[in-house]
Amino acid sequence: MYGSYNCDCGLVHTFSVKCLLTKGAYRQAAAFLSDFAPFLSRVAIFYDDEKMLNTFITSVKKEYRTTTVYASVSKKKIELMRLPEDTKIIVAVGSERAIDSAKYKAHLLDLPLVVSSFPYYSALSSQCVLNDDGALVSCCVNKPRGYIFDTAYPINRENRAELFGQISARLISAFEYYAAGIFDGGKYCPFIAGGLSDIAAKTIISLKDASKDLPFINEILLTASLKQAIIVSSGDVCTGGEIQCGLTYAMLNQELSQPSAQFVFAAVLNKLYLSHVFRRKSFTPPPDNNLRLQQISELIGISEYKALNKICPQLSAKAAAILEYKINEYRIDITQKLRASLNLFKLAFRTFKRLRDDDGYALSAYKSADVSLCIALAPDVIKGQGMLTALKRLGELDCYIV
Ligand SMILES: [Zn+2]
């Protein structure tokens, strides 16, 4: 998957990230980097995982000079940070925090970026999420140029559950992308959406009876996630409800990882959407922006003045009527899609729990009040498109403010 393709949807999809995911990939890491920066030049490595950092440095230290930077997602800190003048390339090693901060710095300095981490959903996309004075902002930046990861890298059970969770969560990403095409007039490609959800469905079904130590499970999970990340990097897949909620939850409570949070919210939203689409009320008052403002400022800990920027203005009566009309017009298609993924989520939840060391005990730490509040406020906390945003605009999420 490399190059540009004329798609039947009428768009040209470009797969521009060079990827190397194989056993022993780190032995080829220096040669891989040399496609972007010559030997003996300086690599700035943004990291937040020391074990992964040491593994990576060991594989390139003979051929490259290295500078390490502990990743921070503070937008200001990254802007002010100075890298050695002779830096020719940036590498992100670790979790999304390392990837997002490296993406932003590489973009500011116009340096090539190579990612070496688990293949997170947005790892190869042109989006990064940063903290701007307490508030989350999503920035559009240059895409990474390369991705390298060694499948022989030790993966623990928690990592496996996370990878499985994020792969499954793409069922809702594909749906949100479809919904954004209807409600926001966004570009929509059925092949991109189909790719995301097919990989999710296949993985869920093939690991249905997964015991924790199934052979090849690491390869299955890494390959499926990387494929999804590549698909996302090629198209304008929107920021959907599961991402908005996952990020909002992370602001409230740092305990759960993004991939796990995305999975839990994806499963919850699937149910919630179905009930909202199925049982349309004849009238819902528009969103109460004053109440939202107060809640968001409390949730994030920023002033109401600053939170004001985050609140989307209310829809005009006509725009609301069009949105309502579209939900009704597409109700059968929407319901069909959601019913199909609902059944897959049921299967996936079992596997997701079984893959974890505690068989899912920690998931009971999710407070339903927090989950409700996140769902209600997420569309204002982080901008996105799709079903969650449409329901918010219609005032249907205000009932989850508790
Ligand atoms: Zn297409």
Image (cartoon, rainbow, N blue to C red):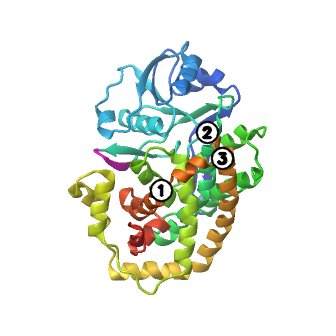
How far apart are labels 2 and 3 at the CA level?
14 Å
Local crowd size for mark 1, using a 10 Å CA cut-off: few (<14), some (14–19), many (≥20): few
The residue depicted at 63 percent of the width and 24 percent of the height is 26
Is mark 2 in CB contact (under 8 Å) with mark 3? Answer: no
Q: Earlier in the sequence, mark 1 or mark 2?
A: 2
The residue beneath circle 3 is 359
Quarter of the image where ligand 1 sits: bottom right
Question: Of residues 284 and 58, which is closer to you in this image?
Answer: 284
Considering depth in this image, is 374 or 334 the residue closer to the camera?
374
Q: Secondary structure at mark 3?
A: loop
Q: Residue at x 23, y 53 (%)?
A: 303
Tell me which residue sits at (36%, 82%) in the image. 318
Circle number at residue 159 = 2
Q: Amino acid at mark 1?
A: Lys
Question: Which stretch is magenta?
Answer: 133-138
Task: Verify CB contact (< 8 Å) between mark 1 and mark 2.
Answer: no
* Residue behind label 1 places its C-beta within 8 angstroms of ligand 1: no
Quadrant containing the N terminus in the rendered view: top right
Q: Which mark is residue 367?
A: 1
Q: Say which element carries label 2.
A: helix
Residue 303, compared with residue 178, is above or below; it is: above
Disc 2 crowd rating (10 Å Cα; few below 14, some 14-19, many 20+) is: some
Q: Position of residue 189 (x, y in %)?
A: 58, 62
Q: Is residue 17 magenta?
A: no
* Above or below, 40 relative to 162: above
In the rendered image, residue 126, in percent from the top left (x then y), is placed at 47, 46
Q: Quadrant of the C terminus?
A: bottom left
Asked if 15 appears above or below 320 in the picture, the reply is above
Please, what is the three-letter code of the amino acid marked with disc 3? Answer: Asp
**Secondary structure that dominates the magenta span:** strand
**Residue 164 numbered tag:** none
Q: Disc 3 and disc 1: Cα gap in Å?
A: 18 Å
